[in-house]
Image: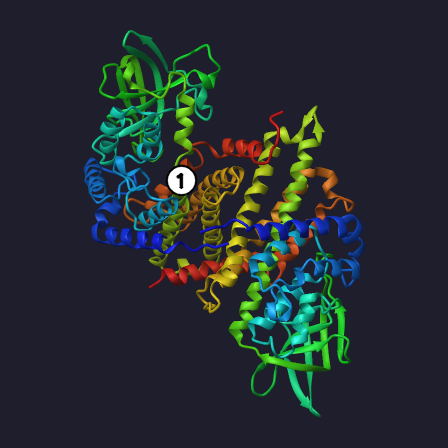
C-alpha cells in the first residue's frame, strides 16, 4: 500500500502547473475564452500536447505514453485548478479510453496517434444520453448516421466525434468528422462558461465504424470520464480554498487579520476537510479505474468509486461557497475569480444528474447487500 | 498509487481471521460496548484478554520482548480492521496498551517494564490515565494537581476527572505539577501511582445515558514513592506527547468501527418492513457510506505518508481530519438509526448511540479545538 505520488507524477504535476500559470492563466487566457466555443488557442493546445498530456492514456505503439488514470488524474487536477477551458478531458481521457476500452485501437491508427500528439482533437457523444438512439444506415457503400446527441462536450473544438449508433445487428462505435456535411452544432450553455457543450444533430453524416460497442466497455469509459472529472473538480476546489485561506492571512479588519478569528479559521478547516475527503475519493477512484480491467459493473470497485465521486460532488461544491463567504463582498463580484470556481464545481455537481439521485443509488446498493 | 496489501500482510490477516472465528463467541461480541456492561461481562472480557495474550494476539504492535508480535504498521492496520470487523471487544486496557505502554517502554526502568507491561496486556491489572482536571480540559497543560517532594516520596494533592476505568483501576498514569514556577508545559511530571495508596478517593461518574464509564479521582496527601516517576522530573509533557502520537495504524479503528456500525444499521433497518424503501433513508445511508469510504482512504493516506516518506505535515493533517470526520459520521449514523428505529430493539441500541455519540466530538480533544490546531498547524492561519 503506497498512496504517495511517484517522482515522475510529481514532475508531471509541476510542469503542468507551471505551464498553465505561465501560458494559460485565468486573467490572460481563461477569461478571454469564456464566450469562445473552442476554449483553447493554437499555442496553448500545442503546449499541452508538447508536455505529453494529450497522449498520457494512449498506448505506446500509437505514440502515447501508455500511462494510467493516476497520471491523467494528476493533469486533470491541475487543469481544474487553472479553470482550463480547453478540450483536454474530452480527447485525452474520454476519446482515448473509448478507443482502448472498446478495442478500437487498430481500426483507425491515425486517430490515436493524432490524439497522442495533439494534432487531432476528439470527443465522445454518449456521456449524456437522453434523445433517441443514433441510427446507422448503409447507403452506396457508405455508412451514414442519423440522430441527435443532446449534450456533447467540446464538439466545436473537436475534429472527430465518437458516436454509438445502432443498425439492425448491434450497436457500434463510429467516428464522424465534425467538418463533414450532415453535422450541425448548437451551443448549449451550462452554468459554467469554462465548459463548452453542444447539441449535435447528425443528418446523414458519413461515419466510419470502428468497433462493436459492448455495454460494459461503454460503462467503463463513462466511469473513467467521471473519475477524471472528479480529479478536475478536486483541483478547482483545492485552488479556491487556497485563495481564500491566503486571503484570510492578509485581509485585516478590527486591526487584525481575519484568519485569526476562530469563526473564519473553522470555515477554512471545513473547506480543507471537504477537499481532503474528495482527494481521498479521487486517489482511490484513479487507482480503481485501472486496478481491475474486468470489473463487474454491478459490484466493481471502479464503478462504485465513480458513483461515490459523483455523489460527493454536491458537498465538494460547498468549498467554493465557503470560499466566497470568507472573501465576503469582493468574492461576490464578477471581477473576482471565485465565482468561476463555484460554477466549475456546480457544473460537475449537475453533470448526469445532481447528487441526490447518486446518493440514493449508493444507499440502495447498500440496502440490497444488507438484505438476505 | 497502490491500495493493495503485500502477500505476507494478507497471510497475517488470514491467520488472525481464522483465530478469531475459532475463538470469539457471540457473548463476547455482545459485551464489546461499555454501555450496559455488567461486572460479569467485565470478568468475561478479562478472560478473553488473557486468551488473546496467550495466543499472541493481545498486543501485536508491542515488541516481542514485552509479549507483543513486533507487527509492522500494515499488520497493525490489518489487525485493527479484522478485530473490528469481527466485532471483537477492545482490550479492557485499550488506553493503557495504546497510550501508556509506549511511554513505559520509552521512559520506564527495566523493573517497571518487566513487571507492569505483561500484567497490563493480560488485563491482570487495569490501568487508568489521570490527565484532565476540572480546570484543565482542552487546555491540558493547565493542570494543577501537584506533587511535592518530601524525603523519599512525592506528596500528591488535587483532583482528576473524566478518568476512564478510574473506578476499576489498580494503576494510574498520573500527570502532576512538580514545578509551579516554570512555564505551564515545563513544570509537569508523570507518576505511576498504585491506586490502593491511602488518600486516593474514586467517585464514579454517571454519564448522560446512565452508564459508569469514568470517574473523578481525588488525591489527599497521597504519599507516592519517588521511584514512581516515569521519565525525567518536569518532563511530563514530553512523556504525554510520546503517548499521544503513538500508533498511527490505530487510525484504522476509525473507519473499521464506522463500517461495522453502518452494517449493523442496515441489518436493523432490514428487519423493519418498509424502512429500506424510504428514499430519504437511502439517501442518508448513501451519504454516510461515501464519507466512511473517504474516511478509510484518509486514514490510509496518513499511514502511507508515515511509511513512504510523505511529509509529517500531510500525515498530521490527514490524521487530525480523520478524527473530526469520524466523530461527524458517528453522529450521523446515530441520528439516522434513532430517527428510523427509535427505541426499538433490546436495550434500544440506537437510542443509546444517539446519546453516547455526542462524546465522539468531545473525548480526546473536542472537534473545535482540533479545528483550531488544524487551522494553525496545517493551514498556517495566525493566532493573532
| Quadrant in which residue A32 is drawn | bottom right
* Residue A228 image position (x, y, % from top left): 60, 59
Q: Residues within 10 Å of mark 1 (few under 14, many from 20)?
A: many
**How many numbered callouts?**
1
Left or right, residue B379 beside residue A46: left
Residue A212's quadrant in the figure?
bottom right
Residue B173 in the image, given as x and y percentages of width and height: 32, 24
* SS of the residue under disc 1: helix
Estimate the x, y position of residue A320 in percent, counting from the top left.
Answer: 65, 46
Give the residue displayed 65% in from the left and 84% down from the top.
A136
Q: Is residue B26 above or below residue B40?
A: below
Q: Which corner quadrant of the image does residue B163 belong to?
A: top left
Kindly give the residue lying farthest to the bottom in the view shown.
A140
Residue A195 appearing in the image: no
Which residue occupies the foreground of this view, A199 or A182? A182
Report the front residue among B264 and B91.
B91
**Left or right of residue B352, residue A329 in this image:** right
Q: Is residue A39 left or right of residue B196?
A: right
Q: Is residue A14 visible?
A: yes
Q: Mark 1 = which residue?
A: B357
Image quadrant for the C terminus of chain A? bottom left
Rendered position, B140 above or below A151: above
Q: Position of residue A217 (x, y in %)?
A: 53, 72
> Depth check: B183 or B169 in front?
B183
Residue, x 60% and y 38% (percent of image)? A268
Colouring rule applied to residues: rainbow
Pointer 1 chain:
B
Amino acid at each position: 500500500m503506497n498512496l504517495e505520488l511517484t517522482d515522475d507524477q510529481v514532475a508531471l504535476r509541476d510542469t503542468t502547473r507551471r505551464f498553465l500559470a505561465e501560458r494559460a492563466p485565468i486573467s490572460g487566457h481563461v477569461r478571454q475564452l469564456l464566450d469562445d466555443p473552442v476554449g483553447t488557442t493554437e499555442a496553448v493546445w500545442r503546449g499541452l500536447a508538447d508536455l505529453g498530456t494529450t497522449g498520457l492514456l494512449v498506448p505506446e505503439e500509437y505514440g502515447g505514453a501508455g500511462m494510467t488514470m493516476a497520471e491523467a488524474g494528476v493533469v486533470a487536477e491541475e487543469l481544474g485548478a487553472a479553470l482550463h477551458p480547453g478540450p483536454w478531458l474530452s480527447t485525452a481521457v474520454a476519446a482515448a479510453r473509448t478507443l482502448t476500452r472498446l478495442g478500437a485501437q487498430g481500426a483507425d491508427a491515425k486517430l490515436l496517434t493524432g490524439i497522442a500528439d495533439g494534432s487531432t482533437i476528439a470527443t465522445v457523444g454518449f456521456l449524456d444520453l437522453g434523445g433517441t438512439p443514433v441510427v446507422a444506415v448503409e447507403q452506396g457503400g457508405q455508412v451514414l448516421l442519423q440522430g441527435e446527441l443532446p449534450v456533447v462536450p467540446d464538439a466545436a473544438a473537436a475534429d472527430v466525434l465518437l458516436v454509438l449508433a445502432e443498425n439492425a445487428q448491434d450497436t457500434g462505435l463510429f467516428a464522424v468528422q465534425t467538418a463533414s456535411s450532415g453535422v450541425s452544432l448548437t451551443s448549449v450553455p451550462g452554468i459554467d462558461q469554462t465548459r463548452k457543450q453542444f447539441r449535435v444533430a447528425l443528418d446523414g453524416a458519413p461515419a466510419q465504424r470502428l468497433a462493436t460497442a459492448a455495454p460494459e466497455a461503454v460503462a467503463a469509459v463513462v466511469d473513467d470520464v467521471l473519475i477524471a472529472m472528479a480529479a478536475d473538480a478536486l483541483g478547482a476546489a483545492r485552488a479556491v480554498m487556497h485563495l481564500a485561506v491566503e486571503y484570510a492571512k492578509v485581509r485585516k479588519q478590527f486591526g487584525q487579520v481575519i484568519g485569526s478569528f476562530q469563526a473564519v479559521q473553522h470555515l477554512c478547516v471545513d473547506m480543507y476537510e471537504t477537499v481532503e475527503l474528495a482527494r481521498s475519493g479521487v486517489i482511490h477512484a484513479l487507482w480503481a479505474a485501472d486496478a481491475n480491467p474486468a470489473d463487474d459493473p454491478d459490484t466493481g470497485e471502479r464503478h462504485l468509486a465513480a458513483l461515490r465521486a459523483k455523489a460527493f460532488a454536491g458537498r465538494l461544491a460547498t468549498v467554493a461557497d465557503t470560499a466566497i463567504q470568507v472573501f465576503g463582498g469582493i468574492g461576490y463580484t464578477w471581477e473576482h475569480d471565485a465565482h468561476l470556481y463555484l460554477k466549475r464545481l456546480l457544473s460537475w455537481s449537475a453533470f448526469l444528474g445532481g447528487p441526490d439521485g447518486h446518493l440514493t443509488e449508493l444507499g440502495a446498493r447498500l440496502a440490497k447487500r444488507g438484505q438476505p | 498509487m497502490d491500495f493493495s496489501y503485500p502477500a505476507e500482510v494478507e497471510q497475517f490477516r488470514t491467520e488472525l481471521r481464522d483465530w478469531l472465528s475459532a475463538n470469539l463467541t457471540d457473548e463476547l461480541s455482545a459485551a464489546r460496548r461499555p454501555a450496559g456492561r455488567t461486572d460479569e461481562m467485565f470478568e468475561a472480557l478479562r478472560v478473553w484478554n488473557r486468551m488473546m495474550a496467550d495466543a499472541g494476539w493481545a498486543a501485536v504492535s508491542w515488541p516481542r520482548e514485552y509479549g507483543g508480535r513486533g507487527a509492522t504498521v500494515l499488520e497493525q492496520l490489518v489487525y485493527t480492521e479484522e478485530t473490528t470487523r469481527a466485532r471483537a471487544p477492545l482490550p479492557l486496557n485499550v488506553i493503557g496498551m495504546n497510550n501508556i505502554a509506549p511511554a513505559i517502554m520509552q521512559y520506564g526502568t527495566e523493573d517497571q517494564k518487566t513487571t507492569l507491561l505483561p500484567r497490563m496486556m493480560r488485563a491482570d491489572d487495569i490501568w487508568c490515565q489521570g490527565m484532565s482536571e476540572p480546570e484543565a480540559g482542552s487546555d491540558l497543560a493547565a493542570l494543577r494537581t501537584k506533587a511535592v517532594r518530601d524525603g523519599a516520596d512525592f506528596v500528591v494533592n488535587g483532583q482528576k476527572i473524566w478518568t476512564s476505568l478510574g473506578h476499576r483501576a489498580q494503576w494510574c498514569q498520573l500527570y502532576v505539577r512538580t514545578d509551579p514556577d516554570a512555564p505551564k508545559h515545563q513544570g509537569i511530571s508523570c507518576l505511576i501511582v498504585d491506586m490502593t495508596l491511602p488518600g486516593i478517593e474514586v467517585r464514579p461518574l454517571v454519564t448522560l445515558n446512565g452508564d459508569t464509564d469514568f470517574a473523578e479521582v481525588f488525591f489527599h496527601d497521597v504519599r507516592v514513592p519517588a521511584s514512581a516517576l516515569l521519565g525525567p522530573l518536569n518532563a511530563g509533557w514530553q512523556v504525554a506527547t510520546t503517548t499521544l502520537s503513538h500508533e498511527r495504524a490505530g487510525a484504522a479503528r476509525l473507519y473499521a468501527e464506522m463500517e461495522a456500525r453502518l452494517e449493523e444499521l442496515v441489518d436493523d433497518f432490514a428487519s423493519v418492513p418498509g424502512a429500506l424503501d424510504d428514499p430519504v433513508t437511502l439517501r442518508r445511508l448513501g451519504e454516510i457510506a461515501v464519507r466512511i469510504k473517504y474516511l478509510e482512504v484518509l486514514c490510509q493516506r496518513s499511514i502511507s505518508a508515515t511509511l513512504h516518506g510523505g511529509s509529517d505535515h500531510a500525515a498530521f493533517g490527514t490524521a487530525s481530519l480523520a478524527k473530526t470526520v469520524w466523530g461527524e459520521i458517528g453522529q450521523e449514523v446515530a441520528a439516522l438509526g434513532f430517527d428510523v428505529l427509535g427505541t426499538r430493539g433490546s436495550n434500544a441500541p440506537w437510542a443509546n448511540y444517539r446519546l453516547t455519540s455526542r462524546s465522539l466530538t468531545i473525548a480526546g480533544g473536542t472537534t473545535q479545538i482540533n479545528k483550531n490546531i488544524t487551522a494553525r498547524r496545517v493551514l498556517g492561519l495566525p493566532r493573532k
